[in-house]
Image: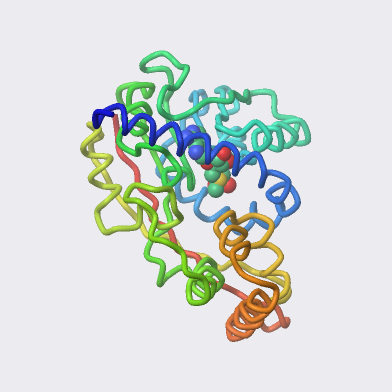
Amino acid sequence: MNTELKMSARFEEIREQQHDTWERFAAGWKKWDGMALSWLAPFGEAMLRKAGLREDAHVLDIATGTGEPGLTAARRVPRGRVTLTDLAEHMLAVASEHVALRGLDNVETRVCETGALPFADASFDAVLCRFGYMFFPDIGIANREFVRVARPGARVCAAIWSDPLKNPWATTILGTIARHVDLPAPPPGSPGLFRCAGTGYMREVFIESGLKDVHEEEVATDMLHESPEHYWTFMNDVAAPVVAGLAKVDAATREKIKAEVLHQARRTPRDDGGIRLRSTATVIVGTR
Ligand SMILES: C[S@@+](CC[C@H](N)C(=O)[O-])C[C@H]1O[C@@H](n2cnc3c(N)ncnc32)[C@H](O)[C@@H]1O
């Protein structure tokens, strides 16, 4: 097989894995939707500040999952429109429930993939993508698609997880699993939470796709849980790498991992007895 064919077969494989994973985990995201919405809101707010939305803007939210930050954007563009897109129908179904519950009449949904967006050139005044890039088969191709559908002067704005050391919400459990489970190193370019975290990585992607005035900002908040057990259940319900890692161990090892995770999580107490886990992202914007 030549290199190009191998790459496209690899991209197809990633797409299918992501599709199946997110369809499967949509129920967990729906269960924890309220918690995830408030946890991730500061990242969405930082993106919307940078997106410079006019009241009549047409906004595209890519990999919107259960609907953010597009749903929040919809209120800021009362004379405009928001198009929510995602690869996984079941994730988008949760977003559609929000559209109905909030009585939004300027939002539409569309199942689609980032490699070939079903929109004409220069269709949108802003393109948003919160915590999606790390799952795309090819990040450069995806970003060039976002630029293609953005109007001249439109902003493309993203949030990606930064350094693992600044993200104990993820490393508390994933680091513990990694110490107990012999996981083979994934091939380069594989999806993963910290795939875009390298210094300057996203900046280069943005500049390479032709975006101008590229700016980055670090944004941090806390993931709050009423107890360490709550955190354990949440991560088992929404995080595919946690479930995949734990599936490789026997019951005794799983209990050992759980005990270590709960112990570590207890070291970040809140005044009310709950726990807080730092969560840090880079928010990046560029202009078409
Ligand atoms: C962590 S969720 C982010 C959801 C939302 N933007 C948020 O911040 O709450 C990642 C989403 O990326 C979607 N996704 C993964 N690969 C994709 C692709 N190739 N094209 C479009 N969406 C994709 C998944 O279906 C999932 O809903």
- Residue at image coords 39%, 34%: 11
The image quadrant where one finds the C terminus is: top left
**Number of marks drawn:** 0
Residue 234 seen in the current view: yes
| Vertical arrangement, residue 215 with respect to residue 124, above or below | below
Q: Nearer the viewer, residue 204 or 106?
A: 204
Q: Seen from this angle, which residue lies furthest front?
A: 1
| Vertical arrangement, residue 117 with respect to residue 99, above or below | above
Q: Seen from this angle, which residue lies furthest right?
A: 101
| Left or right of 30 in this view: 54 | left
Q: Quadrant of residue 40?
A: bottom right
Q: Which of 171 and 102 is in front in this view?
A: 171
| Residue 25 location (% of width, % of height) | 66, 47
Q: Seen from this angle, which residue lies furthest top?
A: 120
| Residue 119 location (% of width, % of height) | 45, 16
| Residue 105 location (% of width, % of height) | 69, 23
Q: Nearer the viewer, residue 240 or 196?
A: 240
The image quadrant where one finds the N terminus is: top left
- Residue at image coords 23%, 36%: 212
| Residue 80 location (% of width, % of height) | 55, 23
| Left or right of 210 in this view: 97 | right
| Left or right of 77 in this view: 32 | right
- Residue at image coords 62%, 37%: 71
| Vertical arrangement, residue 121 with respect to residue 195, above or below | above
- Residue at image coords 64%, 81%: 256
Q: Which colour scheme is used?
A: rainbow
Residue 69 seen in the current view: no
Q: In which quarter of the image is residue 173?
A: bottom right
